[in-house]
Amino acid sequence: MTDTVKTDRGPWTVFLIFLRLGLTSFGGPIAHLGYFRDELVTRRQWLSERSYADLVALCQFLPGPASSQVGIALGLSRSGYAGALAAWAGFTLPSAIALILFALGIASYGDAMPSGVLHGLEVVAVAVVSQAVWGMARNLCPDAPRITIMAAATCIVLLVPSAWGQVAVIAIAAIIGLWMFKPRQGAAHDPLPIAIRRRVGLFWLTLFFALLTGLPLLTAMFPNQTLSMVDAFYRAGSLVFGGGHVVLPLLQAEVVPSGWVSNDAFLAGYGAAQAVPGPLFTFAAFLGASMNQAPSGWLGGLVCLLAIFAPSFLLVVGALPFWERLRGNTRTQAALLGINAAVVGLLLAALYQPAWTSAIHAPRDFGLALVALVALMSWKLPPWLIVVGGGMAGWLLSVTL
């Protein structure tokens, strides 16, 4: 093994490695996992190919942002808990800081921004969500039963537009998956190079569920804006299956009806989040910085960022000791098949409300969304370029039509 491999175990070194990845990892969670593999499996040989594949499988099984959770686990494997925090900070802070600055810019200079730019970003968000729906549906809904689950989930979520309605849909889909699907036993694998005792894992899992159930009770007993924000974003980070785009409907249900963030600002920030590298969950930092009530700005962004990522730490560290047994359980895999199909339905509902209903008002909006979608899916242009082009096109359309 090379000297580089032997000496890159300290938290500071882990932070620098992931900082470079956080500054350059465009393209969404699948691309992030490819960057991690090239850098940390192929080049640095932190773990074997099969161990890395097994780690990815664990993080895709858990709710939350899979690429960030893989990064946390990789940092944990190199330098313990400090390494996990270092990996998360390096990968997350570049996009979080950029989105907070964007939120502050809208708040301070929104009136000076050329007319149509923000609307162009909202239209781009329609194209981005459409691409996510299409890609996820092809992979997660390949047959009639799962397409049916997807469609039913979409209808229920649109009829019951609340965060708890979405949780109920996921739970029902898991039950249907247990009853309907019969997956095969998993293939051989290498043990993960992370040693955590089951007693320690059980402690972290208990803390995860204690916060998930206790924060709503604390918020009801002691009404407080900061506590309400922590509750809302912790719950969103705990209940999102299927990747960063699926957090859109959960966050929209929490921050827009309550008046914390306007729907226009929400969609503009979501569009801008496509232009920055790193995890899409840093959209939470934009929302925290955009709050109409204190805390907002840098403090609000930090509060929401920590709250939405806290479940990822607790779940990854808590689940690792139990994964060897869990990964081979066909009943677990069957429930996950149903959950994944429902997740596509949640995202399809988000494509309609709020993305489509808030952004597509005229034929020109539909045309711009279509061009952006073709650029993403057929031309394979980078998302940041499409976001910039969407903002410019929105401005041009506003001054010429």
Image (tube, rainbow, N blue to C red):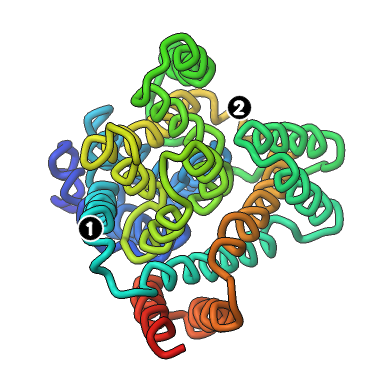
| Element carrying mark 1 | helix
Disc number at residue 325?
Answer: 2
Side (left or right) of 328 relative to 180? left
- Which badge, 1 or 2, is on the more N-terminal residue? 1
Graded by Cα atoms within 10 Å as few (under 14), some (14 to 19) or many (20 or more), the crowding at tag 2 reads few
- Above-or-below relation of 237 to 394: above
Residue 343 % position (x, y): 65, 47
Q: Classify mark 1: residues with Cα within 10 Å, few (<14), some (14-19) or many (20+).
A: some
> Cβ–Cβ below 8 Å for labels 1 and 2?
no
Q: Nearer the viewer, mark 1 or mark 2?
A: 1
Q: Position of residue 338 (x, y in %)?
A: 74, 43
Q: Nearer the viewer, residue 272 or 76?
A: 272
Residue nearest the observer in this picture, 89 or 253? 253
Q: Amino acid at mark 2?
A: Arg
Read off the residue under disc 1.
105
Q: Which mark is residue 362?
A: none
What residue is shown at x 42% (from left), y 25% (from top)?
228
Question: Going 58% across and 70% down the picture, which residue do you hit?
Answer: 360
Judging depth in this view, the residue of 192 and 286 nearest the camera is: 286
Residue type, mark 1 in image: Gly
Q: Is residue 18 visible?
A: no
Q: Which residue lies at the image location 57% right of the left edge and 68% below the top edge? A: 131
Q: Residue at horizontal 42%, vertical 63%? A: 271
- Give the secondary structure at mark 2: helix
Tell me if residue 386 comes above or below residue 214 in the rendering.
below
Decide: is 32 above or below 289. Answer: below
Q: State how many labels appear.
A: 2
Q: Position of residue 18 (x, y in %)?
A: 24, 50
Real-space Cα separation, disc 1 to disc 2, in angstroms: 49 Å
State the image coordinates of residue 143 (x, y, percent, origin top left).
82, 59
